[in-house]
Amino acid sequence: MLLLPEPVRRLAAWCAVVLLVSGVVWIGIRLCVAFRTAVTPVLLALLGTALLRPLFRRLVDAHVNRSLAAGITCVAVVVVVGGAVYIVVAALIDSGSQIVAALKRAGQSLATYFGGAGTSLGDLASHGKRLLEKFGGTAASNVISGVSVVGEWLAMAVLALLLVFFFLRDSGRAVGALRTLVPRGSADAAEAMARRAFAGVEGFMRGTTFIALIDAVCITTGLLVLRVPGAVGLGALVFVGGYLPYLGAFLSGAVAVLVALADRGFVIALWVLGVVLAVQVLEGHVLQPMIQSRTVRMHPAVVLLAITAGASVAGIVGMLLAVPLTAAVFGIAHELRERYAVPS
Protein backbone atom coordinates (compact mmCIF):
# COMPACT_ATOMS: atom_id res chain seq x y z
CA MET A 1 0.00 0.00 0.00
CA LEU A 2 2.86 2.36 0.80
CA LEU A 3 4.28 1.82 -2.69
CA LEU A 4 1.17 3.27 -4.28
CA PRO A 5 1.11 6.95 -5.23
CA GLU A 6 -0.70 9.37 -2.90
CA PRO A 7 -3.67 10.00 -5.28
CA VAL A 8 -4.27 6.26 -5.62
CA ARG A 9 -4.24 5.79 -1.84
CA ARG A 10 -6.72 8.61 -1.40
CA LEU A 11 -8.97 7.08 -4.05
CA ALA A 12 -8.77 3.70 -2.33
CA ALA A 13 -9.64 5.27 1.02
CA TRP A 14 -12.66 7.06 -0.46
CA CYS A 15 -13.79 3.85 -2.18
CA ALA A 16 -13.61 2.01 1.14
CA VAL A 17 -15.66 4.72 2.84
CA VAL A 18 -18.27 4.70 0.05
CA LEU A 19 -18.55 0.91 0.16
CA LEU A 20 -18.91 0.93 3.95
CA VAL A 21 -21.58 3.65 3.94
CA SER A 22 -23.43 1.98 1.04
CA GLY A 23 -23.43 -1.33 2.91
CA VAL A 24 -24.82 0.25 6.05
CA VAL A 25 -27.50 2.10 4.06
CA TRP A 26 -28.44 -1.07 2.18
CA ILE A 27 -28.78 -3.07 5.40
CA GLY A 28 -30.86 -0.26 6.91
CA ILE A 29 -33.17 -0.20 3.88
CA ARG A 30 -33.60 -3.98 3.95
CA LEU A 31 -34.45 -3.86 7.65
CA CYS A 32 -36.98 -1.08 7.04
CA VAL A 33 -38.60 -3.11 4.25
CA ALA A 34 -38.70 -6.22 6.43
CA PHE A 35 -40.35 -4.29 9.28
CA ARG A 36 -42.37 -1.95 7.05
CA THR A 37 -45.59 -2.39 9.03
CA ALA A 38 -43.84 -0.80 12.01
CA VAL A 39 -41.47 1.57 10.19
CA THR A 40 -44.03 3.10 7.82
CA PRO A 41 -46.35 4.43 10.58
CA VAL A 42 -43.35 5.94 12.38
CA LEU A 43 -42.18 7.77 9.26
CA LEU A 44 -45.70 8.94 8.41
CA ALA A 45 -46.13 10.11 11.99
CA LEU A 46 -42.89 12.09 11.80
CA LEU A 47 -44.11 13.81 8.62
CA GLY A 48 -47.46 14.52 10.22
CA THR A 49 -45.75 15.90 13.31
CA ALA A 50 -43.57 18.18 11.18
CA LEU A 51 -46.65 19.48 9.37
CA LEU A 52 -48.91 19.87 12.40
CA ARG A 53 -46.47 21.21 14.98
CA PRO A 54 -47.26 24.90 14.23
CA LEU A 55 -50.94 24.32 15.04
CA PHE A 56 -50.00 22.39 18.17
CA ARG A 57 -47.66 25.16 19.33
CA ARG A 58 -50.36 27.77 18.82
CA LEU A 59 -52.71 25.80 21.05
CA VAL A 60 -50.01 25.31 23.68
CA ASP A 61 -49.17 29.03 23.57
CA ALA A 62 -52.88 29.68 24.21
CA HIS A 63 -52.44 27.74 27.50
CA VAL A 64 -54.18 24.60 26.29
CA ASN A 65 -53.05 21.41 27.99
CA ARG A 66 -50.47 19.54 25.87
CA SER A 67 -52.49 16.32 25.75
CA LEU A 68 -55.66 18.21 24.84
CA ALA A 69 -53.81 20.26 22.22
CA ALA A 70 -52.39 17.10 20.63
CA GLY A 71 -55.84 15.51 20.64
CA ILE A 72 -57.46 18.55 19.01
CA THR A 73 -54.73 18.59 16.36
CA CYS A 74 -55.24 14.91 15.55
CA VAL A 75 -59.02 15.32 15.34
CA ALA A 76 -58.58 18.27 13.00
CA VAL A 77 -56.35 16.13 10.77
CA VAL A 78 -58.91 13.33 10.65
CA VAL A 79 -61.67 15.78 9.70
CA VAL A 80 -59.65 17.54 7.00
CA VAL A 81 -58.12 14.41 5.46
CA GLY A 82 -61.38 12.47 5.64
CA GLY A 83 -63.26 15.33 4.02
CA ALA A 84 -60.70 15.68 1.25
CA VAL A 85 -60.75 11.94 0.52
CA TYR A 86 -64.55 11.91 0.47
CA ILE A 87 -64.70 14.86 -1.93
CA VAL A 88 -62.12 13.31 -4.27
CA VAL A 89 -63.73 9.88 -4.31
CA ALA A 90 -67.25 11.27 -4.74
CA ALA A 91 -66.17 13.51 -7.60
CA LEU A 92 -64.36 10.70 -9.37
CA ILE A 93 -67.33 8.36 -8.95
CA ASP A 94 -69.68 10.99 -10.38
CA SER A 95 -67.38 11.55 -13.35
CA GLY A 96 -66.46 7.90 -13.84
CA SER A 97 -69.23 7.14 -16.30
CA GLN A 98 -68.32 10.20 -18.36
CA ILE A 99 -64.66 9.15 -18.48
CA VAL A 100 -65.62 5.63 -19.54
CA ALA A 101 -67.94 7.03 -22.23
CA ALA A 102 -65.15 9.25 -23.56
CA LEU A 103 -62.77 6.32 -23.69
CA LYS A 104 -65.39 4.21 -25.46
CA ARG A 105 -65.90 6.92 -28.08
CA ALA A 106 -62.17 7.14 -28.55
CA GLY A 107 -61.99 3.35 -28.96
CA GLN A 108 -64.76 3.41 -31.55
CA SER A 109 -62.95 6.12 -33.47
CA LEU A 110 -59.76 4.11 -33.45
CA ALA A 111 -61.61 0.95 -34.47
CA THR A 112 -63.19 2.81 -37.38
CA TYR A 113 -59.86 4.33 -38.39
CA PHE A 114 -58.04 0.99 -38.24
CA GLY A 115 -60.96 -1.04 -39.52
CA GLY A 116 -58.79 -2.83 -42.05
CA ALA A 117 -56.93 -4.54 -39.26
CA GLY A 118 -60.04 -6.50 -38.36
CA THR A 119 -60.10 -5.29 -34.75
CA SER A 120 -63.30 -4.03 -33.18
CA LEU A 121 -64.68 -3.38 -29.77
CA GLY A 122 -66.64 -6.63 -30.03
CA ASP A 123 -63.44 -8.58 -30.57
CA LEU A 124 -61.83 -6.86 -27.60
CA ALA A 125 -64.88 -7.61 -25.45
CA SER A 126 -64.86 -11.30 -26.42
CA HIS A 127 -61.14 -11.58 -25.69
CA GLY A 128 -61.66 -9.85 -22.36
CA LYS A 129 -64.48 -12.23 -21.47
CA ARG A 130 -62.32 -15.27 -22.21
CA LEU A 131 -59.51 -13.85 -20.10
CA LEU A 132 -61.88 -13.24 -17.19
CA GLU A 133 -63.21 -16.79 -17.44
CA LYS A 134 -59.68 -18.18 -17.59
CA PHE A 135 -58.30 -16.20 -14.70
CA GLY A 136 -61.41 -15.91 -12.55
CA GLY A 137 -59.84 -17.82 -9.68
CA THR A 138 -56.79 -15.59 -9.75
CA ALA A 139 -59.00 -12.50 -9.70
CA ALA A 140 -60.88 -13.82 -6.68
CA SER A 141 -57.64 -14.47 -4.81
CA ASN A 142 -56.46 -10.99 -5.74
CA VAL A 143 -59.64 -9.50 -4.29
CA ILE A 144 -59.05 -11.37 -1.03
CA SER A 145 -55.44 -10.21 -0.89
CA GLY A 146 -56.58 -6.68 -1.70
CA VAL A 147 -58.96 -6.73 1.26
CA SER A 148 -56.11 -7.81 3.52
CA VAL A 149 -53.92 -5.00 2.15
CA VAL A 150 -56.65 -2.46 2.87
CA GLY A 151 -56.93 -3.76 6.41
CA GLU A 152 -53.16 -3.49 6.84
CA TRP A 153 -53.23 0.09 5.56
CA LEU A 154 -56.03 1.04 7.92
CA ALA A 155 -54.12 -0.44 10.85
CA MET A 156 -50.98 1.49 9.88
CA ALA A 157 -52.99 4.70 9.49
CA VAL A 158 -54.49 4.34 12.96
CA LEU A 159 -51.05 3.58 14.42
CA ALA A 160 -49.56 6.60 12.64
CA LEU A 161 -52.30 8.85 14.03
CA LEU A 162 -51.66 7.59 17.57
CA LEU A 163 -47.93 8.16 17.11
CA VAL A 164 -48.60 11.71 15.91
CA PHE A 165 -50.47 12.32 19.16
CA PHE A 166 -47.58 11.04 21.28
CA PHE A 167 -44.92 12.78 19.18
CA LEU A 168 -46.71 16.10 19.54
CA ARG A 169 -47.44 15.72 23.23
CA ASP A 170 -43.95 14.50 24.18
CA SER A 171 -41.93 16.54 21.69
CA GLY A 172 -40.29 18.46 24.53
CA ARG A 173 -38.66 15.28 25.80
CA ALA A 174 -37.24 14.20 22.42
CA VAL A 175 -34.01 16.21 22.71
CA GLY A 176 -33.26 14.88 26.18
CA ALA A 177 -33.92 11.29 25.04
CA LEU A 178 -31.63 11.74 22.05
CA ARG A 179 -28.80 13.12 24.17
CA THR A 180 -28.98 10.11 26.48
CA LEU A 181 -28.68 7.67 23.55
CA VAL A 182 -25.44 9.06 22.06
CA PRO A 183 -21.98 9.39 23.63
CA ARG A 184 -21.54 12.49 25.76
CA GLY A 185 -18.96 14.05 23.46
CA SER A 186 -21.24 13.72 20.44
CA ALA A 187 -24.47 14.89 22.08
CA ASP A 188 -24.26 18.47 20.81
CA ALA A 189 -23.51 17.38 17.24
CA ALA A 190 -26.28 14.76 17.29
CA GLU A 191 -28.79 17.29 18.62
CA ALA A 192 -27.78 19.85 15.98
CA MET A 193 -28.09 17.31 13.16
CA ALA A 194 -31.46 16.11 14.44
CA ARG A 195 -32.76 19.66 14.67
CA ARG A 196 -31.50 20.48 11.18
CA ALA A 197 -33.02 17.29 9.73
CA PHE A 198 -36.39 17.93 11.36
CA ALA A 199 -36.28 21.58 10.29
CA GLY A 200 -35.68 20.46 6.71
CA VAL A 201 -38.64 18.08 6.83
CA GLU A 202 -40.83 20.67 8.57
CA GLY A 203 -39.95 23.37 6.06
CA PHE A 204 -40.52 21.03 3.14
CA MET A 205 -43.91 19.85 4.44
CA ARG A 206 -45.06 23.37 5.27
CA GLY A 207 -43.93 24.81 1.95
CA THR A 208 -45.34 21.88 -0.03
CA THR A 209 -48.70 22.21 1.72
CA PHE A 210 -48.91 25.94 0.98
CA ILE A 211 -47.90 25.44 -2.66
CA ALA A 212 -50.35 22.55 -3.08
CA LEU A 213 -53.12 24.72 -1.63
CA ILE A 214 -52.36 27.55 -4.07
CA ASP A 215 -52.25 25.09 -6.99
CA ALA A 216 -55.56 23.55 -5.94
CA VAL A 217 -57.28 26.94 -5.59
CA CYS A 218 -56.02 28.18 -8.97
CA ILE A 219 -56.90 24.99 -10.84
CA THR A 220 -60.29 24.71 -9.11
CA THR A 221 -61.08 28.30 -10.10
CA GLY A 222 -60.17 27.54 -13.71
CA LEU A 223 -62.29 24.40 -13.72
CA LEU A 224 -65.27 26.27 -12.26
CA VAL A 225 -64.94 29.01 -14.89
CA LEU A 226 -64.80 26.35 -17.63
CA ARG A 227 -67.78 24.55 -16.00
CA VAL A 228 -66.00 21.22 -15.68
CA PRO A 229 -67.99 18.77 -13.50
CA GLY A 230 -66.47 17.78 -10.19
CA ALA A 231 -64.23 20.85 -10.08
CA VAL A 232 -64.01 20.89 -6.28
CA GLY A 233 -63.13 17.21 -6.14
CA LEU A 234 -60.51 17.60 -8.85
CA GLY A 235 -59.05 20.54 -6.94
CA ALA A 236 -58.83 18.36 -3.83
CA LEU A 237 -57.07 15.72 -5.92
CA VAL A 238 -54.58 18.36 -7.08
CA PHE A 239 -53.95 19.31 -3.45
CA VAL A 240 -53.30 15.70 -2.43
CA GLY A 241 -51.10 15.14 -5.47
CA GLY A 242 -49.02 18.16 -4.50
CA TYR A 243 -47.30 16.05 -1.83
CA LEU A 244 -45.75 13.99 -4.63
CA PRO A 245 -43.62 16.60 -6.44
CA TYR A 246 -43.83 16.75 -10.24
CA LEU A 247 -45.39 13.30 -10.68
CA GLY A 248 -48.42 14.09 -8.51
CA ALA A 249 -49.09 17.31 -10.41
CA PHE A 250 -48.86 15.43 -13.70
CA LEU A 251 -51.29 12.71 -12.64
CA SER A 252 -53.86 15.03 -11.05
CA GLY A 253 -53.68 17.37 -14.05
CA ALA A 254 -54.18 14.43 -16.40
CA VAL A 255 -57.33 13.41 -14.49
CA ALA A 256 -58.68 16.97 -14.75
CA VAL A 257 -58.04 17.07 -18.51
CA LEU A 258 -59.65 13.65 -18.94
CA VAL A 259 -62.79 14.70 -17.09
CA ALA A 260 -63.01 17.89 -19.16
CA LEU A 261 -62.59 15.86 -22.35
CA ALA A 262 -65.35 13.48 -21.30
CA ASP A 263 -67.94 16.11 -20.46
CA ARG A 264 -67.01 19.34 -22.26
CA GLY A 265 -65.21 18.25 -25.38
CA PHE A 266 -61.78 18.66 -26.94
CA VAL A 267 -61.59 22.46 -26.89
CA ILE A 268 -62.43 22.79 -23.20
CA ALA A 269 -59.95 19.99 -22.44
CA LEU A 270 -57.25 22.04 -24.17
CA TRP A 271 -58.19 25.06 -22.04
CA VAL A 272 -57.94 22.90 -18.90
CA LEU A 273 -54.55 21.67 -20.04
CA GLY A 274 -53.47 25.28 -20.50
CA VAL A 275 -54.66 26.14 -16.98
CA VAL A 276 -52.79 23.19 -15.48
CA LEU A 277 -49.58 24.03 -17.35
CA ALA A 278 -49.83 27.71 -16.38
CA VAL A 279 -50.21 26.79 -12.71
CA GLN A 280 -47.25 24.42 -12.90
CA VAL A 281 -45.10 27.13 -14.49
CA LEU A 282 -46.18 29.53 -11.73
CA GLU A 283 -45.25 26.93 -9.12
CA GLY A 284 -41.86 26.08 -10.59
CA HIS A 285 -40.67 29.63 -11.31
CA VAL A 286 -42.36 31.72 -8.61
CA LEU A 287 -43.83 29.75 -5.72
CA GLN A 288 -41.04 27.24 -5.18
CA PRO A 289 -38.21 29.84 -5.06
CA MET A 290 -40.22 32.25 -2.89
CA ILE A 291 -41.81 29.87 -0.38
CA GLN A 292 -39.05 27.32 0.05
CA SER A 293 -36.09 29.67 -0.26
CA ARG A 294 -35.41 29.44 3.50
CA THR A 295 -35.64 25.66 3.72
CA VAL A 296 -33.67 22.83 2.12
CA ARG A 297 -34.09 23.26 -1.61
CA MET A 298 -33.32 20.39 -3.94
CA HIS A 299 -32.72 20.25 -7.65
CA PRO A 300 -35.61 18.72 -9.64
CA ALA A 301 -33.30 15.95 -10.83
CA VAL A 302 -32.58 15.01 -7.20
CA VAL A 303 -36.31 14.99 -6.44
CA LEU A 304 -37.11 12.73 -9.41
CA LEU A 305 -34.28 10.34 -8.52
CA ALA A 306 -35.49 10.22 -4.92
CA ILE A 307 -39.06 9.44 -6.04
CA THR A 308 -37.80 6.70 -8.38
CA ALA A 309 -35.66 5.15 -5.66
CA GLY A 310 -38.52 5.32 -3.16
CA ALA A 311 -40.90 3.66 -5.62
CA SER A 312 -38.43 0.84 -6.26
CA VAL A 313 -38.03 0.22 -2.51
CA ALA A 314 -41.53 0.66 -1.11
CA GLY A 315 -43.96 1.50 -3.91
CA ILE A 316 -46.38 4.37 -3.37
CA VAL A 317 -45.37 4.81 0.26
CA GLY A 318 -41.74 5.06 -0.80
CA MET A 319 -42.65 7.72 -3.35
CA LEU A 320 -44.42 9.77 -0.67
CA LEU A 321 -41.61 9.43 1.88
CA ALA A 322 -38.62 9.72 -0.44
CA VAL A 323 -38.54 13.51 -0.87
CA PRO A 324 -39.04 14.45 2.82
CA LEU A 325 -36.37 11.94 3.84
CA THR A 326 -34.05 13.36 1.20
CA ALA A 327 -34.71 16.82 2.64
CA ALA A 328 -33.70 15.49 6.06
CA VAL A 329 -30.49 14.02 4.60
CA PHE A 330 -29.71 17.36 2.95
CA GLY A 331 -30.24 19.11 6.27
CA ILE A 332 -27.82 16.74 8.03
CA ALA A 333 -25.28 17.16 5.25
CA HIS A 334 -25.46 20.96 5.55
CA GLU A 335 -24.98 20.75 9.31
CA LEU A 336 -21.94 18.48 8.92
CA ARG A 337 -20.47 20.75 6.29
CA GLU A 338 -20.86 23.79 8.53
CA ARG A 339 -19.36 22.00 11.51
CA TYR A 340 -16.46 20.12 9.95
CA ALA A 341 -15.64 21.97 6.75
CA VAL A 342 -11.98 22.92 6.53
CA PRO A 343 -11.69 26.71 6.29
CA SER A 344 -10.12 27.85 3.03
Image: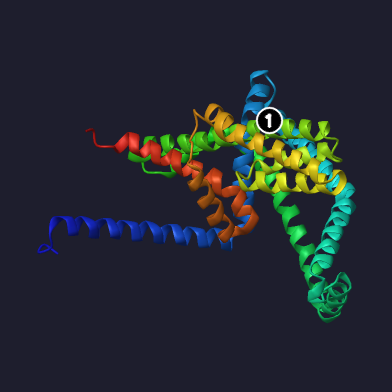
Q: Residue furthest left?
A: 3
Nearer to me, 15 or 119: 119
The reply, left or right, for residue 36 in relation to residue 189 is right
Nearer to me, 260 or 162: 260
Q: Which of the 4 image quadrants contains residue 221?
A: top right
Determine if residue 142 is in view: yes
Q: SS at mark 1?
A: helix
Which residue appears at 80% of the width and 46% of the height? 266
Determine if residue 206 is in view: no
Residue 12 image point, x, y percent? 23, 60
Q: Residue furthest bottom?
A: 134
Residue 182 image point, x, y percent? 40, 44
Amino acid type, residue under disc 1 in the picture:
Ile
Which residue appears at 82% of the width and 71% of the height? 115
The reply, left or right, for residue 197 in relation to residue 162 is left
* Scheme by which the image is coloured: rainbow
In which quadrant is the C terminus drawn?
top left
Q: Which residue is mark 1?
A: 214
Which residue appears at 83% of the width and 77% of the height? 127
Nearer to me, 111 or 133: 111
The reply, left or right, for residue 91 in relation to residue 313 is right
Which residue appears at 64% of the width and 50% of the height? 41
The reply, left or right, for residue 205 in relation to residue 224 is left
Residue 246 image point, x, y percent? 60, 45
- Vertical placement of 207 versus 92: above or below? above
In which quadrant is the N terminus drawn?
bottom left
